[in-house]
Amino acid sequence: MPQRLHPDLDPLDQGFLEGVVTGEARLTAEQGLELYHRLPPQELGRWADLRCEALHGDSIRTYVIDRNINYTNVCTAKCIFCAFKRAGHEDDAYTLDYETLLQKIRELSDIGGTQILMQGGMNPDLEIEWYIELLQRIRTEFPHIHVHAFSPPEFVEFVNFFDPPGDDFKAKVRYVMKRLIDAGLHSLPGGGGEIFAPMVRSRIGMGKCDAESWLTVMRVAHELGMNTSATMMFGHIEGIADRIHHMDMVRNRQDDTIRELEDSGGGRYVAFISWPFQPDNTALGRLKEWGNGPGDDLADPYPGDVVAKVDGSGDKSAHPEFGRRLRLAGASAYLRTQALSRLYLDNIYSIGSSWVTMGPHVGQLGLRWGANDMGSVMMEENVVSSAGTTHCLNEPMLCRLIRDAGFMPAQRDNNYDLVKVHDGPDAPDLAVDNWADYRAEQLHVEQDTPCSGSGNGEQGEATVQLTIDR
Ligand code: SF4
């Protein structure tokens, strides 16, 4: 393969960026950081759009119908960005019983859904047999439903809770994962990625696994033939270089995975989804935003940027306010970060737009900023809804957003194979007679019962039943 890294080139060089679009050139971490800071936002989006078009064509953009089921909110970790977890003694601590879980899947199946995204807190009271019986029951009653479940932090705690046989951590993960695959698990979601850089991760994710453990769980999944996704939650205390470092770790491991496992039927990361931190009801959200604290001067660099290094070696002693000031990400920061992920992650097939956290229209804009996929119709979600995010979309609305962005909407499955291309008059959005009534009803539902969801974090269970059968 010809040399694709050109570290001496200016990343704003037109010819170099054209090479990134075609896949003939690859950004270094330093070039990625320069692009983020020096390229005007709309230019960054344009190059990401071109890269997306080179990979996915210019006609179809996809979504999936799944249900985000958060089976328990009891968790041993103390992530300070999380409004969902409970210790177990509170009145609203819960673990769903099998019948409730199966009923949720039944409702999904009834509307043509193809998969569940099932994640929870790390609940020490649940034995491995509980998970095995649950998966077996799902497989028996819903053999057509893809079970996308249990993020890496859950697997790390499965090893701690179940004490499985194995000489090392990786062998123990493999033992547990094989038993769950045998019972009906199909693939792993990428929840709990957050930010890999140790200075940031140890500050915001107390009790949650480190980056190496997260990546090891995913490697085992790939060795066992499963495809997975990777995620990033940004817009809190991290620097921009931390985001690049996070993407770089994913890209490097994906290189290894493709090189070592491609010929033996291994899996890989098929999607990357990033979204901004949602601050409401969280300890992290109570930090002052940069610029509002005593002595803050917006003319100075943000503390996270002073500390962050693209190789992950940031040292918090570099700035006394590191970890004490937030820099929340708005629409512009979100779109720029997503665009950079499309350009940087040249070995990952899909980039997902996070309409759940950013709202439908920023999510729609994301389809022109490097994303090829709008994620999921949201039946329910409880995690980012706990943190104050309240966007809901049903299938017609999701299809209309995609079509209004200039693309043909298509339902996909978990492997990104197309289930239905909506090119006829019976398309979910084209069959709607009166959008005014339709939207009013949805708004009323949202106001009555707050709902949202990332469809990608291991955050919580949602509360709204949408009228998605219209
Ligand atoms: S983010 Fe996940 S692991 Fe962390 S406290 Fe919340 S439920 Fe637990």
Image: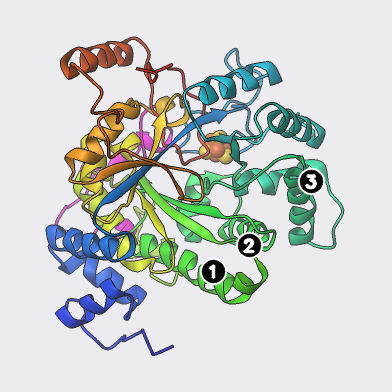
> Overall secondary structure of the magenta stretch?
loop
Q: Residue at x 12, y 62 (%)?
A: 40
What mark, if any, has residue 219 been given in the picture?
Answer: 2
Q: Which residues are magenta?
A: 277-305
Image quadrant holding the C terminus, namely: top left
Secondary-structure class at tag 3: helix
Q: Residue at x 25, y 42 (%)?
A: 293
The image shows residue 90, relative to residue 345, as above or below, that is above
Left or right for 247, reference 218: left
Indicate which label's residue lies in the foreground, 3 or 1. 3
Quadrant for residue 116, please give it: top right
Q: Position of residue 104 (x, y in %)?
A: 57, 21
Give me the C-alpha separation between circle 3 and circle 2: 17 Å
Which residue is under mark 3?
179
**Amino acid type, residue under disc 1 in the picture:** Arg
Q: Residues within 10 Å of mark 1 (few under 14, many from 20)?
A: some
**Amino acid type, residue under disc 2 in the picture:** Arg
Is 280 inside the magenta-drawn segment?
yes
Q: Position of residue 436 (x, y in %)?
A: 16, 16
Of mark 2 and mark 1, the one earlier in the sequence is 2
Give me the C-alpha separation between circle 3 and circle 1: 25 Å
Q: Residues within 10 Å of mark 3 (few under 14, many from 20)?
A: some
**Amino acid type, residue under disc 3 in the picture:** Arg
Label count reads: 3
Which residue is under mark 1?
253
The image shows residue 288, relative to residue 226, as above or below, that is above
Of mark 3 and mark 1, the one earlier in the sequence is 3
Of mark 3 and mark 2, the one earlier in the sequence is 3
Tags 2 and 1 touching, CB below 8 Å: yes
Please tell me which residue lies in front, 397 or 215. Answer: 397
